[in-house]
Image (tube, rainbow, N blue to C red):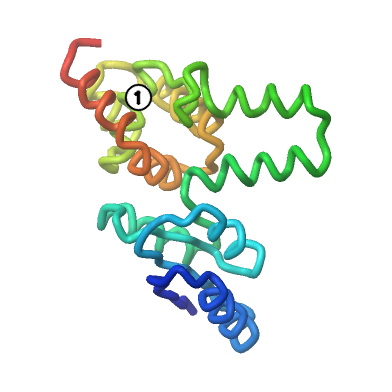
Amino acid sequence: MLFLIVHTSDDVSLASEHISLVRDKHPSGRIVVVADHYRSPEPDLAFQIGAAGYLVCDMSCDAFVKSIELIMMGEAVFPPVFQTSALDLESEQGRNAAQADEDVGAILGSENTGAPPLSPRELVILRCLISGSSNKSIARKIGIAEATVKVHVKAILRKIWVQNRTQAAIWGMNHPVLAKSANDIFQSPI
């Protein structure tokens, strides 16, 4: 069972009450908060009290549908910014400061853009994943072996900290700068 809680006010306690109420009545239900705009502490709070997702209305229709599909399959979907704050929380709870700095550096990439450093080939492949292409189709499009595509896909999944192609596609849709640069790269010879 899926429950969408539409949150349009600045009163976070109201959304929290709704999440708790639904969680109490339907413990096995999947709860998603759909907000009119991103409010920094809310994804953390929603996650802590049992929401499986926090989506913002300004995301594309495709990203919204894929996010709902992931949530229905048992995954959690939160804004990319939440992943960084969740990792920060984890590092505060159990790691030493030096290790945490290395982890954050790896996540943010060398330019602190919030995106990991993906190679130009990985950007092209990520763009193909966003469009729903299979490994065989990607291999034919860019003129490499299907096995090489698989290696690149695994590297992308590892770098952006996701578990499957659908999550990678959603991650890519939530990073329009990457999608744009992938389009630029795809237009030029590799």
Instruction: Name the amino acid, label 1.
Output: Leu
Residue in view at x 81 percent, y 34 percent: 95
Q: Among all residues in the image, which is located at the extreme bottom?
A: 25
Q: Among all residues in the image, which is located at the extreme top?
A: 189
Side of 22 where 96 appears, left or right? right
Question: Does 16 sit above or below residue 174?
Answer: below
Within the image, what quadrant is residue 104 found in?
A: top right
Q: Pointer 1: what residue?
A: 123
Residue in view at x 31 percent, y 30 percent: 177
Q: Residue 132 or 6: which is nearer the viewer?
A: 6
Q: Residues within 10 Å of mark 1 (few under 14, many from 20)?
A: many
Q: Among all residues in the image, which is located at the extreme front?
A: 10
The image shows residue 78 at horizontal and vertical percentages of 50, 54
Q: How many marks?
A: 1
The image shows residue 35 at horizontal and vertical percentages of 40, 65
Within the image, what quadrant is residue 51 found in?
A: bottom right
Question: Does 160 sit above or below residue 55?
Answer: above
Residue in view at x 45 percent, y 58 percent: 70
Question: Does 122 sit above or below residue 91?
Answer: above
The image shows residue 174 at horizontal and vertical percentages of 37, 43
The image shows residue 190 at horizontal and vertical percentages of 25, 11
Residue in view at x 32 percent, y 61 percent: 57
Side of 163 where 152 appears, left or right? left
Question: Does 62 sit above or below residue 184?
Answer: below
Secondary-structure class at tag 1: helix
